[in-house]
Amino acid sequence: MRRHCLKHTIRMIAGLVTGLLFAITAISLNAQPTHSAAQPPLAWGYDKAHEITLTGTITAVNEKSAGGSPVGLHLMVSASQGQVDAHLGPYIAKETIEALHTGTPIQIVGAMEKLHGKEYLLARQVIFSGRLVQVRSENGFLVRERTAKSHHGNQKSAFVSNGGAR
């Protein structure tokens, strides 16, 4: 009689272990993130084949990103296409941000990208007040804008270096 109880207990434990392993496998397969959810907000593909040039007027300068929008500086631009949210990123120099004002005419070269149902113009180049600011490389990688004193007094001139990660 003891052998019968022992065999029954072993079978029950084996069944429980098998069921537990099956449940763990099923849960881990369902817990895998989707491809789009795993990407950070700035890791979208920049489609240089669909670059556009937008000409308009700055209606707002937003240094703080709204929830769900790309991190960094945003310009709201009124153009013939309507109101456009242009993303300039987190690497714009303070002097450049201070020079961007509501009402300033601006030209932006970049590509449109959709995130969470909203479209953004990922700026590659920004031209305003006689200045050219490089925001992204030709492949869409964000670059860091730096300023340095020129050899002629306290005038500042902008130059660009690669910012590394997006």
Image: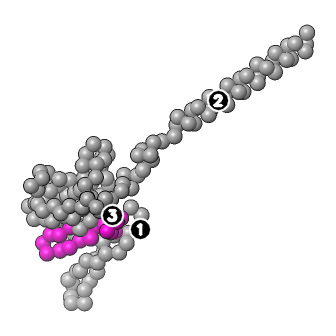
Quarter holding residue 67: top left
What residue is pinned by disc 3? 140
Tag 2 or tag 1, which sits nearer the N-term? Answer: 2
Compared to 80, does 25 lie above or below?
A: above
Give amino acid for label 3.
Gly
Give amino acid for label 2.
Phe
Q: Residue at x 25, y 77 (%)?
A: 158
For residue 163: magenta? Answer: no
What residue is pinned by disc 1? 164
Q: Nearer the viewer, residue 134 or 93?
A: 134
Q: Quadrant of the C terminus?
A: bottom left
Please name which of the two marks, 1 or 3, marks the residue nearer to the observer.
3
Residue 22 disc label: 2
- Location of residue 157 in the rendering, given as x and y in whole percent from the top left corner: 23, 80
- Location of residue 13 in the rendering, given as x and y in whole percent from the top left corner: 76, 22
Tag 3 or tag 1, which sits nearer the N-term? Answer: 3
Q: Which stretch appears magenta?
A: 126-143
